[in-house]
Image (cartoon, rainbow, N blue to C red):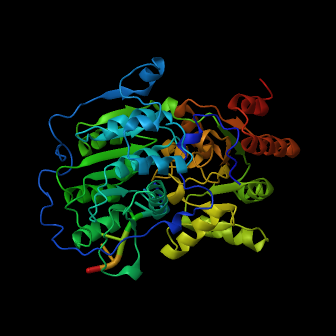
DNA sequence: AAAAAAC
């Protein structure tokens, strides 16, 4: 299972998931405290609107713009940086939860973000850091440290772009807060079985549409909510539908609100909007050249014809099942078709897309987390945030593209391959290229991130197998990324 | 295209 041995010190603390054997679905629970007042009564719906007019915080806030590069250049910069969780003046219960998750030392992003997040008065924050570096734990810690467990009403709200990610985050928060007496948490995702029941937990994690609906129907008491977190914030604010929903949600919350935006990517076209959404934020940013994870070995395979993609995929099945693997496709239909074909040929694969019912989605992701299903075919629904440490291989069966299906989508590519190589582990990302267009798309992605991608030479299949097998084995053995690169390039 | 809400 999850080997905790031999990982470098700074990688251990950044774990985002509940410990092995603690599936996220066990976590959600809530109390049945009675609601006694009108949740919308005091919501500030004016002045907190979109562009240029977000909810202001106190004037006394300390605005800091920190560039990670600067801090790396000066590791002793005393400005808002902690080397241990103990320095943060957290409650003993919360520290106990942190230790229980095997966090020993803050990761780089946690080191910088936590002191800024925990400052009083609370200050908005926009934080960027690479996939798998502990963003979830950072904002979860901030949420938990600000919960008054003697007040049963909702106090913090976190939004995520998919049902699966919302459930995962809820699991982390619940796990981290397990020693806090009286803490209640619940998911706000579509659930027909709960009808018109109010959401009474102190920490709510949900998807934007459902949360907006529940606020509107006064099934969430917004009066005491003091923190709003958008995970995968660029995605949440970029897309028309979700951007509107998130803005409406913000408008339904109190004016005195700490707004926290986290993502690995903040493309230029959404950064300005993000700054208006979370005014006067402290910011941690990265240049896009700094976003690729060294431990993720990016390979591509040139396939003659579209028709041959499926046959090529099958060749990798044995490698995929060495550990866990995710196959990303562009459409729901392709996901279904691939699943059908592979299952018909006796392969064990699971498939998840937004076309499935909620309970089926829950069942399938849980099977994948537990290792019961080792190969998962999916769409971009799972491109972001999902943390399954056993994932050693990500296959881009279709190159990720924008809505026009012509231009490459570098952000989505980065998030997809970030499902492996979590917390310092190594992983393989393999992209299928089958014609000039798809080659150009991948080339555009490589250029955007200034990263190297290695072609796989299919004429020598044994060598291909050996190379990937070695990467997977090294992932378990905790080999350094330098050794890995030599392995792939033959030391060139 | 995918995702995210159903009154």
Name the residue at 72% across, 38% down: A478
Question: Where does residue A462 sit, x and y in percent of width and height?
Answer: 88, 45
The image quadrant where one finds the N terminus of chain A is bottom right
> Total label count?
0
Residue A32 appears in the rendering? yes
The image quadrant where one finds the C terminus of chain A is top right
Is A121 left or right of A201, judged from the image as shown? left
Name the residue at 57% across, 68% down: A333
Between A83 and A254, the residue placed more toward the observer is: A83
Between A169 and A410, the residue placed more toward the observer is: A169
Question: Where does residue A72 sit, x and y in percent of width and height?
Answer: 48, 22
Quadrant hosting residue A273? top left
Residue A232 appears in the rendering? no
In the depicted structure, whether residue A85 falls above or below residue A170: above
In the depicted structure, whether residue A48 falls above or below residue A29: above
Is A323 left or right of A92, judged from the image as shown? right
Is A279 left or right of A17, judged from the image as shown? left
Question: Where does residue A40 sit, x and y in percent of width and height?
Answer: 16, 66
Between A70 and A274, the residue placed more toward the observer is: A70
Name the residue at 45% across, 17% down: A74
Quadrant hosting residue A6? top right
């Amino acid at each position: 299972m999850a080997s905790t041995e031999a990982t470098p010190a700074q990688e251990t603390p950044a774990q985002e998931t509940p410990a092995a054997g603690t599936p996220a679905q066990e976590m959600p629970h809530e109390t049945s405290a009675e609601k006694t007042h009108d949740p919308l009564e005091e919501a500030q719906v004016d002045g907190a609107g979109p562009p240029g007019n977000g909810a202001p915080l106190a004037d006394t806030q300390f605005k800091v713009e920190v560039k990670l590069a600067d801090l790396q250049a000066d590791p002793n910069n005393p400005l808002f940086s902690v080397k241990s969780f103990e320095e943060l003046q957290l409650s003993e219960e919360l520290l106990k939860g942190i230790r229980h998750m095997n966090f020993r030392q803050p990761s780089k992003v946690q080191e910088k973000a936590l002191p800024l997040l925990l400052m009083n008065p609370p200050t908005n924050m926009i934080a960027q850091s690479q996939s798998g570096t502990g963003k979830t734990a950072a904002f979860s810690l901030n949420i938990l440290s600000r919960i008054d467990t003697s007040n049963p009403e909702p106090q913090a709200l976190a939004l995520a772009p998919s049902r699966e990610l919302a459930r995962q985050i809820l699991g982390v928060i619940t796990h981290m807060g397990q020693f806090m007496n009286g803490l209640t948490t619940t998911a706000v995702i579509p659930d027909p079985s709960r009808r018109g029941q109010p959401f009474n937990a102190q920490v709510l994690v949900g998807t934007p549409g459902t949360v907006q609906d529940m606020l509107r129907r006064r099934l969430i008491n917004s009066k005491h909510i003091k923190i709003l977190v958008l995970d995968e914030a660029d995605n949440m604010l970029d897309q028309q539908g979700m951007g509107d929903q998130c803005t409406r949600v913000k408008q339904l919350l109190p004016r005195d609100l700490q707004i926290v935006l986290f993502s690995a990517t903040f493309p230029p076209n959404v950064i300005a909007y993000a700054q208006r959404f979370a005014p006067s934020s402290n910011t941690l940013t990265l240049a896009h050249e700094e976003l690729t994870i060294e431990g993720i070995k990016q390979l591509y395979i040139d396939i003659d014809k579209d028709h041959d993609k499926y046959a090529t995929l099958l060749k990798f099945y044995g490698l995929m099942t060495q550990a866990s693997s995710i196959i990303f496709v562009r459409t729901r239909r392709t996901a279904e078709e691939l699943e059908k074909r592979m299952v018909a040929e006796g392969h064990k694969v699971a498939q998840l897309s937004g076309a499935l019912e909620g309970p089926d989605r829950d069942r399938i992701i849980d099977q994948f987390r537990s290792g019961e299903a080792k190969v998962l075919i999916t769409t971009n629904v799972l491109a972001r945030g999902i943390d399954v440490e056993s994932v050693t291989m990500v296959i881009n069966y279709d190159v990720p593209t924008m809505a026009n299906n012509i231009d490459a989508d570098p952000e989505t590519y980065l998030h997809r391959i970030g499902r492996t190589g979590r917390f310092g582990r190594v992983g393989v990302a393999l992209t299928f290229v089958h014609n000039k267009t798809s080659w150009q798309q991948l080339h555009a992605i490589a250029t955007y991130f200034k990263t190297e991608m290695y072609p796989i030479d299919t004429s020598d299949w044994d060598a291909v197998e050996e190379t990937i097998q070695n990467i997977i084995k090294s992932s378990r053995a905790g080999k350094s990324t330098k050794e890995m690169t030599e392995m792939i390039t033959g030391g060139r």
